[in-house]
């Protein structure tokens, strides 16, 4: 009898274990970062700030009166995935907004605002009404688009997870060209300098393409995947790699000028000011390097990873740490000053307008900090009213 | 990035081991998962063998357990004590089979998390992965890992692999299932035999196939170990099992002879069959020569209901 009862008990314990495993996998297993949520930055044009929300909408914020306008939500790519493994929007284990993730910062040109979605589509909206002007591709979907867009010479340029760079007609959305396929996906945002487009790929290479037709000018290979956006400054392109190096590469022929190693990845786009490049690393430090010889001018500890691209305000560089602390670096004295703490995680790039820093956080809010005084202004909700 | 204890002790080592293994195994994340499974199974090898031997030992204890049940049928407390003593004397632990599974559970969960992070399924995952990496150059040069292995996308569920997981688990359970004559125990065994494979097969339809690859490799290893320890076990008909069943029937019949039939023992809805009915149903008198064949029939209809269904059919055939 004892054994019989224990058999029953063992069966129950086993069942409990399986249930525990299921709960463990779906709750404990669903660690932060398994679902695409998005971290779009803001772009200001004519008194309006445009940002991609975590609901999968383009939001226009009138920065004079805080009024907001929302676009129609981006349509999710149909997927057959289940549970946590579904990488597309919606479903899954995390309590995330059921919208298409938007990572890239909107680009504004003329009366159109452009945005790319994780659903693999590029959208052009009317900047005043937020009505959709065109969508590319019209019917099908590309692979997820993580990087931002750049508009130049009447074209919209972007990189895609299918490993190609695309150029579309900015007015109609017609494809002008698509590049050769790089060795892996592209999450980097392209940068245009003159007639050259610079972009990094997961295949560990930095590419220089002819902006007119997408042909390759040169490539430079690093030892790690490239996710960050390049910075072009004084005939040099600066790019961070997952091998923990920041590379300075000649824009004309792709030759290495110097490289600098941190303790973790350079994820965010650096900024340059007065012959010094300021690069934030995921090791929680900002490195100020002389652009001519990579000499370390200064090193600042922000105490948590830096994945958010900084902004320049007057002669100061504003950085945000992952934990939501905003710092300012005075480029004259190279002193770090804690400006404010918004107490929310910051992943996306910062945006500045009229001395106010705008920070889009994971809680569907747009936080505002006065860049000079550090005063935290009233934050704006990006949650739609529908 | 501050890591909690779970991340520091379990998740971080698993992620880094997987990345390093990938580096040395032709940058194949699938091979790294298989290699990790081997490592885990080597580490828990003593426990696994202990469990297999425990299951094997349980089979040998069956006759003694049956005797105890008969002897202390009316004193459950005493029966429990005697069974405990028997387990202790023979070095068996009925809960021992759960220990390897308990130990592997954190690894399963960590593996699931690692797969999702290391494959950079979502940009947030890749960004967070940076916080888990050891400062080894090899770790940084290989990321993010490739998600293709054979026909699998290791980040997505796969139906064929789910079937393989269920199938190999069923085989392994079947091999380790002890032969028993007790219908309740048989029901329990049947439940265990089907429940685990079905549950894990279902889980595989919802989670990355990288995790299923771990499970199927683990099951194949355990099938091998089980075969080495006790052969095909429950997969082939066991003569010992039949003997146990015969012993059981014999003892039941003897017990029925010893205990006089009382009116109170027979439910109101039980009707004594007539001699004709007995003939048709195949009841035989206690003490018939049939007992030597080892497949005797209960002396009363009420007792017939206590036999497992398959035994009833068996009786009819033999008759």
Image (cartoon, grey):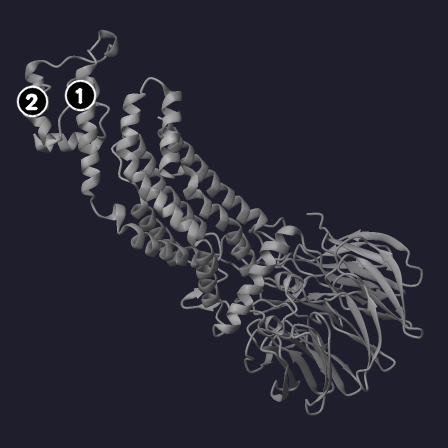
Q: Secondary structure at mark 1?
A: helix
Quarter of the figure with residue B20: bottom right
Residue highlighted by disc 1: B254
Q: Residue at x 80, y 70 (%)?
A: A286
Q: CA distance from mark 2 to mark 1?
A: 12 Å
Residue B200 vertical placement versus A63 (above, below): above
User: What label sits on residue A345 in the rendered view?
Assistant: none
Residue A98 x %, y %: 61, 52
Of the pair B160 and A188, the residue shown nearer to us: B160
Give the side of residue A71 with respect to residue B191, left or right.
right
Which numbered dot is residue B288?
2
Local secondary structure at mark 2: loop
The residue lying at 68 percent from left, 77 percent from top is A190
Residue pictured at 70% horizontal, 74% vertical: A229
**Which class describes the residues within 10 Å of circle 2: few (<14), some (14-19), or many (20+)?**
few
**Relative to B160, is A228 above or below?**
below
Q: Is residue A73 left or right of residue A257?
A: left
**Do tags 2 and 1 sit on the same chain?**
yes
Q: Chain of mark 1?
A: B
Left or right relative to A347: residue A328: right
Residue A263 percent across, percent down from the top left:
72, 70
- Letter of the chain that mark 2 sits on in the rendering: B
Q: Is residue B182 above or below residue A316?
A: above
């Amino acid at each position: 009898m004892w054994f019989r009862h224990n058999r029953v008990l063992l069966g129950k314990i086993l069942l409990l274990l399986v249930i525990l495993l299921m709960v463990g996998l779906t709750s404990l297993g669903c660690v932060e970062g398994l679902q695409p949520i998005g971290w779009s930055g803001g772009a200001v044009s004519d008194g309006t700030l445009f940002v991609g929300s975590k609901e999968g909408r383009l939001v226009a914020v009138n920065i004079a009166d805080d009024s907001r306008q929302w676009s129609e939500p981006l349509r999710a790519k149909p997927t057959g995935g289940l549970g946590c493994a579904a990488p597309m929007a919606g479903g899954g284990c995390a309590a995330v907004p059921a919208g298409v993730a938007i990572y890239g910062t909107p680009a504004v040109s003329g009366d159109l605002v452009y945005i790319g979605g994780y659903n693999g589509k590029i959208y052009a909206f009317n900047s005043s009404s937020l009505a959709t002007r065109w969508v590319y591709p019209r019917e099908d979907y590309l692979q997820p688009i993580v990087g931002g867009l750049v508009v130049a010479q009447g074209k919209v340029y972007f990189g895609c997870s299918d490993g190609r760079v695309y150029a579309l007609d900015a007015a109609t959305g017609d494809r002008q060209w698509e590049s050769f396929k790089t060795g892996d996906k592209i999450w980097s945002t392209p940068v245009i300098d003159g007639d050259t487009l610079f972009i990094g790929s997961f295949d560990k290479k930095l590419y220089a393409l002819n902006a007119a037709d997408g042909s390759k000018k040169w490539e430079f290979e690093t030892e790690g995947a490239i996710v960050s956006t390049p910075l072009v400054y004084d005939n040099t392109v600066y790019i961070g790699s997952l091998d923990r190096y920041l590379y300075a590469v000649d824009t004309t022929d792709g030759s290495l000028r110097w490289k600098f190693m941190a303790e973790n990845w350079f994820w965010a786009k650096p900024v340059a000011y007065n012959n010094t490049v300021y690069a934030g690393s995921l090791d929680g430090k900002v490195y100020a390097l002389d652009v001519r010889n990579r000499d370390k001018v200064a090193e600042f500890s922000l105490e948590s990873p830096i994945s958010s691209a900084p902004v320049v305000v007057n002669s100061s560089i504003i950085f945000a740490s992952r934990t939501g602390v905003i710092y300012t670096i005075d480029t004259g004295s190279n002193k770090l000053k804690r400006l404010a703490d918004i107490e929310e995680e910051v992943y996306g790039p910062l945006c500045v307008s009229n001395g106010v820093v705008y920070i889009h956080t994971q809680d569907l809010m747009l936080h505002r900090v006065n860049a000079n005084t550090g005063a935290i202004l009233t934050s704006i909700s990006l949650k739609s009213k529908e | 990035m501050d890591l909690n204890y779970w991340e520091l002790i379990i998740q971080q080592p698993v992620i880094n081991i997987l990345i390093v293994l990938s580096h040395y195994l032709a940058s194949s994340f699938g091979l790294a998962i298989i290699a990790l499974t081997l490592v885990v199974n080597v580490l828990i090898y003593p426990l696994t063998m202990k469990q297999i031997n425990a299951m094997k030992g349980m089979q040998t204890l069956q006759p003694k357990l049956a005797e105890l049940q008969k002897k202390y049928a009316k004193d459950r407390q005493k029966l429990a004590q005697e069974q405990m003593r028997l387990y202790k004397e023979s070095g068996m632990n009925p809960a021992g089979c759960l220990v390897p599974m308990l130990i592997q559970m954190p690894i399963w969960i960590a593996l699931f998390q690692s797969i999702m992070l290391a494959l950079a399924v979502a940009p947030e995952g890749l960004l967070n992965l940076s916080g888990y990496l050891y400062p080894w150059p090899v770790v940084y040069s290989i990321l993010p890992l490739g998600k293709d292995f054979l026909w699998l996308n290791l980040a997505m569920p796969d139906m064929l692999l789910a079937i393989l997981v269920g199938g190999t688990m069923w085989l392994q359970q079947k091999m380790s299932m002890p032969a028993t004559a007790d219908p309740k125990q048989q029901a329990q065994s049947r439940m265990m035999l089907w429940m685990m494979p079905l549950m894990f097969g279902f889980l595989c339809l919802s989670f990355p196939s990288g995790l299923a690859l771990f499970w199927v490799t683990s099951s194949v290893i355990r099938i091998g170990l089980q075969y080495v320890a006790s052969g095909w076990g429950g997969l082939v008909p066991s003569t010992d099992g039949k003997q146990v069943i015969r012993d059981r029937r014999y003892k039941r019949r003897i017990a029925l002879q010893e205990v006089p039939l009382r009116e109170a023992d027979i439910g109101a809805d039980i009707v004594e069959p007539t001699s004709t009915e007995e003939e048709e149903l195949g009841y035989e008198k206690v003490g018939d020569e049939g007992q030597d064949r080892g497949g005797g029939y209960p002396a009363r209809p009420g007792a017939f209901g206590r036999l497992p269904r398959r035994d009833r059919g068996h009786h009819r055939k033999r008759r």
